[in-house]
Image: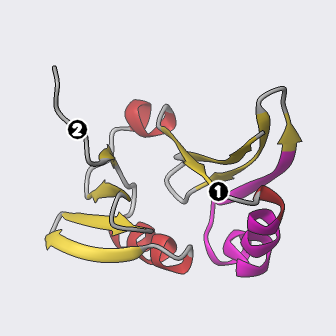
Amino acid sequence: MKHAAKSIRAFIGAKNFDESRQFYKDLGFEESILSKSMSLFKVSDKLGFYLQNAYVKDWVDNSMLFLEVDDVNRYWDELQKLGLQQKYEGVKLTPIREESWGKECFLHDPSGILWHFGEFY
């Protein structure tokens, strides 16, 4: 196929839709409500995901997203300052880990979705 892709967006679920909507706004995403059961959350015109008012435990427990950032150390510091672990039950932060390809830190959202925030070397 020969056409230029413009963006890619994952669909993720939420155990508690309203709580997850607030969580992602607190994380710095901009919400566009698409319907009463779906919102688009973006950090730029081309980077975003769809949050659905749908929860299937096996699906959500196995969902992961990777967001490449320009400085994972700064991002980690900013994540810690947000206090998301204190505000939302089940939210877990895992410190930066260095790998052969770069480094990353991790965040579990209130539903259990695992986010990787990474920086490539």
> For the point 26% across and 50% down, which residue is it?
54
Residue highlighted by disc 1: 69
Assess whether mark 1 and mark 2 are in contact (beta carbons under 8 angstroms): no
Q: Residue at x 79, y 37 (%)?
A: 102
SS at mark 1 in the image: loop
Left or right, 58 with reference to 72: left
Going by the image, does 76 lie left or right of 2?
Answer: right
The mark found on residue 24 in the picture is none
- Residue 102 forms part of the magenta stretch: no
Compare residues 64 and 92 and report the one nearer the observer. Answer: 64
| Mark 1 nearby-residue class (10 Å; few <14, some 14–19, many ≥20) | some
**Mark 2 or 1, which is nearer the eye?**
2
Q: Nearer the viewer, residue 74 or 95?
A: 74
> Which residue in the structure is indicated by mark 2?
4
SS category of the residue bearing label 2:
loop
Q: Write the start and end of the magenta stretch as one range.
A: 74-96
Q: Is 34 located above or below residue 3 in the figure?
A: below
Report crowding for label 2: few under 14, some 14 to 19, many 20 or more residues within 10 A (C-alpha). Answer: few
Q: Amino acid at mark 2?
A: Ala
Q: Indicate which disc, 2 or 1, sits on the residue closer to the N terminus.
A: 2
Q: CA distance from mark 2 to mark 1?
A: 23 Å
> Can residue 94 be found in the magenta stretch?
yes
How many marks can you see? 2
Q: Is residue 89 above or below residue 8?
A: below
**What is the three-letter code of the residue carrying label 1?**
Val
**Colour convention:** secondary structure
Residue 51 at x, y percent in the picture: 31, 58
**Residue 47's x, y, as percent?**
40, 58
Q: Is residue 90 left or right of residue 11?
A: right
Q: Is residue 101 above or below residue 117?
A: above
Q: Position of residue 78 (x, y in %)?
A: 75, 74
